[in-house]
Amino acid sequence: MQNISNTMHKNPKLRLAALLTAPILWLVVAYLGALATLLVTAFFTIDSFTGNVLQIFNLGNFQDMLTDVAYKNVVLRTLGIAISVTIICTILAIPMAFYMAKIAKPRSRKILVALILTPLWASYLVKIYAWRTMLEPGNGVLEWLLGPIGFKSPGFGGPAIVIGLSYLWLPYMILPIYAGLERLPNNLLDASGDLGAHNWHTFRRVVLPLIFPSLVAGSMFTFSLSLGDYITATIIGGKLQMLGNVVYQNFSINLPFAATIATIPVTIMAIYLWMVRRTGALANL
């Protein structure tokens, strides 16, 4: 025992591995165990009379999900919203992060980072209900601001969901890109300009490849969070439903089918992470 203790003391990697044993064990049991239970439950059925879950293996839930056009539309709608939110957050985050990392003064950077983090301290529901007030057709804030110039509020629906989710998850895209740009040497930008490259060419050939891992990290947050969200769709989505809404509605009345629907975002994220891993971006974070 003493020899093992001495070996761990001399080898920092072994000491770190010992410290991480408990968190990793918790992750395997609590997270992966829950996912495994979810997958198993999706193959069960429910007694239509009593509402009890019957642990009888069947593929009926998956058959219903794959053959019903309504659920296909929900999957495509959710995927489209998640992709749109990720693209919008990327377009907005890059110039904001670039200004914070390369243009703002060092003292101002801390203030800007704090301002980016400030919305995360507010309640999720408060922010969404604030957007409901702004987007409300007829007498909402956007209607009041845009009405005099001939524009109307988009109201409640798909555009409102995209706007709300983009606002919610934008900080999760800005911060990774900001961290990547902060590590980007300024002399690379100066050298590109000295060699005659225009700003767009410098961004496309120098900046973008170097911050690509940061973009991937941010997209993992925005895409996964949008894919599993249901509260935003409930409050400002009007009659539109996302996958999370279908899971929530079926959870208390048909748990196996709710578990079947819940496997869709898990599968999509697994495919997305596999594609990201193929690019090698995760290794460069």
Image (cartoon, rainbow, N blue to C red):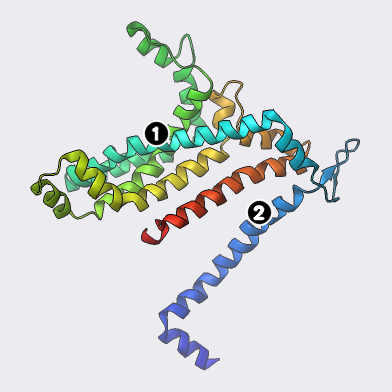
Which residue is nearer to you in this view: 30 or 95? Answer: 95
Question: In this rendering, would 185 be left or right of 263?
Answer: left
- Identify the residue at horizontal 67%, vertical 32% (top origin): 71
Residue 35 is marked as: 2
The correct choice, above or below, for 159 with respect to 177 in the image is above
Q: Splitting the image into 4 quarters, where does residue 237 fall? A: top right
- Seen at 67% across and 59% down, the residue is 33
Left or right: residue 189 versus residue 13 is: left
Q: Nearer the viewer, residue 60 or 166?
A: 60
**Rendered position, 159 above or below 184:** above
Say which residue label 1 marks: 88
- Within the image, what quadrant is residue 234 found in? top right
Q: Position of residue 255 (x, y in %)?
A: 76, 42
Q: Nearer the viewer, mark 1 or mark 2?
A: 1
- Residue farthest to the left? 194
Query: x, y (%) of residue 107?
Result: 19, 46
- In the rendered structure, the answer to whether residue 109 lies left or right of residue 279 reads left
- Whole-percent x, y for residue 60 in the image: 80, 42
Q: Amino acid at mark 2?
A: Leu
Report x, y in % for residue 261. Answer: 68, 40
- Which residue is located at x 46 percent, y 46 percent? 221
Binning the other alpha carbons within 10 Å of mark 2 as few (below 14), some (14 to 19) or many (20 upward) gives some
Q: CA distance from mark 1 to mark 2?
A: 30 Å
Q: Can residue 255 be seen here? A: no
Whether residue 21 is visible here, answered yes or no, is: yes
Relative to residue 117, is residue 220 drawn left or right? Answer: right
Identify residue type, mark 1: Ile
